Amino acid sequence: MTLIKFENIIKTYHLGDQKIEVLRGMSFKIERGEFVSIMGQSGSGKSTLMNIVGLLDIPTDGKYSLDDESVENFNETQLTEIRRRKIGFVFQQYNLLARMNTLEQVMLPLKYQGVPKKERQARAEEALRIVGLSDRMFNRPNELSGGQQQRVSIARAIVTNPEIILADEPTGALDSHTGKEIMELFLNLNRQGRTIVLITHEREIADYAQRIIHIADGKIIENL
């Protein structure tokens, strides 16, 4: 079943009198449960594409359907609610809060959703078990390696049980060995039924996915 559908998506920015077309008529589908890589070099439009998929930005033209609903029909409050409920974000920078320990970091999205504290803690502990960090629950970020910090950010992304995980260059700040461990974790999450959309400029990382959408200059040049 199609979960994400782009139909002739165009995204244009205006800088003074200059018009910059970042996405140029992009069309593709991602099925529920797929693991898809969006691959492209810097400036190809892949981060803009991810922001639109993640409802952080809206297209200038074209139609984006998420779970058979057209995104243009939603107001900002509805978009925020859908983001919280359906989408988990993982970034190259871990975006962890220095003053919080691992467990508190992962509980935070559930606090925003109004989940009771006892349930928040139980769900956060389970998310940390899934990413292999049960023994690091009370460590702060400066006590963790880069790979462990990225695992915390992944646990934080999955604790709300989202349908979609959007990962933007999640191995970009890691060495190759740790990067492989993180990608194996994404494979396991996908096997559990989560839809994963991975943004990368590295072919070796993109190859972990079932399908690669290769973009350049805001257009799809390959969809394998």
Image (cartoon, rainbow, N blue to C red):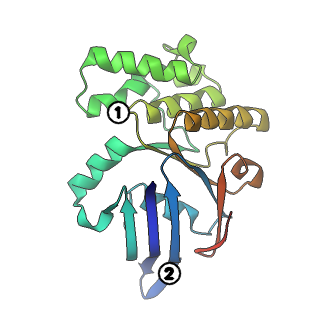
| First of labels 1, 2 by sequence position | 2
In the foreground, 9 or 103: 9
Horizontal arrangement in the rendering, residue 127 relative to residue 120 (left or right)? right
Q: From where the camera sits, is residue 103 visible?
A: no
Picture layout, residue 139 above or below residue 53 = above
* Dot in front, 1 or 2: 1
Tag 1 secondary structure: helix
| Residue at image location 42% in from the left, 26% down from the top | 106
Quadrant position of residue 149 = top right
| Residue at image location 52% in from the left, 74% down from the top | 26
Tell me which amino acid carries mark 1: Pro
* Residue with the mark numbered 2: 20
Q: Residue furthest bottom?
A: 17
* Residue with the mark numbered 1: 109
C-alpha separation, residue under disc 1 versus residue under disc 2: 35 Å
Q: Are marks 1 and 2 in contact (CB under 8 Å)?
A: no
Tag 2 secondary structure: strand
Tell me residue 160's x, y (percent).
Answer: 37, 33
Tell me which amino acid carries mark 2: Ile
